[in-house]
Image (cartoon, helix red, strand yellow):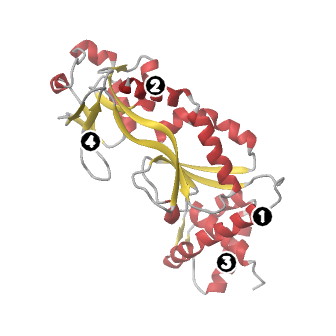
Amino acid sequence: MGSIDLLKAVKTFTATYELASFSAAGRQLGLTPGAISKQIGMLESLLGCRLFQRTTRNLSATEEGRRLYALVHQPAQQIEDAFAALSSAEARISGVVKVSLPIAFTRVALLPVLRKFREQSPLVTLDLRFENRHVDLISEGYDCAIGNLPDVDSNIVSRNLSPSLQVVCAAPSYLERHGEPRSIEELEQHELIAFRSPSSGRIQAWKLQAKSKEVVFQPQPRLIVTDTEALAELAVAGCGIVLLGAHHAFPLIDAGRLKHVLTEFVERRSDICIYYPTRKHLPPRVAAFVDFVIEEIRQSEIVKRSERLLGQQKD
């Protein structure tokens, strides 16, 4: 076996592990699948164990492969970040930014302007993972994430992007058949669609607040879902009244597919933010993306509209 560049081999291994494909890792690193396979083979020979199980259709990590990834993926990224931080200020920003994103908010607030980032940083590869959950940045290897950050963590830096508001709404077709509720109490006479938390298994209460009062309403629904996209689609189909994220509801309201009801009430949840691991030197590719997201989203119309709605509750 020839000599092996360990840093290169570890980088190849982590890309292969994360993408579960020699071809995908090759595309990310600018190498052929054959070159990726050869690097992995040399690393396996050096370590004396198999890191991946290979079949004609699938590539999966072995127990040894999973252990190695847990040990090396953060140090390898830190070394790469250190080299990037020490590079010339004129050097073009490049590399992969792995991001966890909430589906509905990203669709209306970030995707429409993402082309601008591609034009500003053409050598940066964005690995966008759409998932409505709180991720562990360190253990799952994310550079940053957008969403509600439930807990304060000294290892995490968070920057606010937008208020997170929920509004009560229903399809015009439903309201034509059943009438529009004029009070929280009247909701009990209506068909309601509720959300069950996939993590806790509980049906979420509607914690509504107006200028001078707060009401906790526990829906008694005939329809219960664990997906916000399904929640919105069922509402649009006229199946009942829902509590829906404002950023999700606004485009549907503007299109006439939903109507905002009980407009004096909103539910406010923890703000939507972008968060990333605490580091003395944030990698240039990650810093560029974080700065872009903050600037673009904070000035987006969807966020300004949420802020105006929140302001009405305080007047």
- Distance from disc 2 to disc 1, alpha carbons, whole Å, reads 43 Å
Quarter of the picture holding the C terminus = top left
Question: What is the crowding at mark 2: few (fewer than 14 residues within 10 Å), some, or many (at least 20)?
Answer: few
- Distance from disc 2 to disc 3, alpha carbons, whole Å, reads 58 Å
Q: Is residue 63 above or below residue 22?
A: below
Identify which residue is drawn at 75% across, 59% down.
30
Give the camera-side residue of 57 and 118.
118
The disc, 1 or 3, on the residue closer to the chain's N-terminal end is 3
Q: Position of residue 190 (x, y in %)?
A: 19, 24
Residue that mark 3 sits on: 41
- Quarter of the image for residue 196 reads top left
Identify which residue is drawn at 57% across, 30% down.
300
Which numbered marker is on residue 287?
A: none
> In front: mark 4 or mark 3?
4
Total number of numbered discs in the rendering: 4
Label 1 near label 4: C-beta < 8 Å?
no
Residue that mark 4 sits on: 204
- Quarter of the image for residue 218 reads top left
Residue that mark 2 sits on: 308
Quarter of the picture holding the N terminus = bottom right
The disc, 4 or 3, on the residue closer to the chain's N-terminal end is 3
The disc, 2 or 4, on the residue closer to the chain's N-terminal end is 4
Q: Position of residue 115 (x, y in %)?
A: 68, 36
Give the camera-side residue of 310 and 176.
310
Residue that mark 1 sits on: 86
Q: Position of residue 144 (x, y in %)?
A: 56, 53
- Indicate left or right for 300 with 169 as reference: right
> In front: mark 4 or mark 1?
1
- Distance from disc 2 to disc 4, alpha carbons, whole Å, reads 25 Å
The disc, 2 or 3, on the residue closer to the chain's N-terminal end is 3
> In front: mark 2 or mark 3?
2
Q: What kind of residue is marked 4?
A: Gln
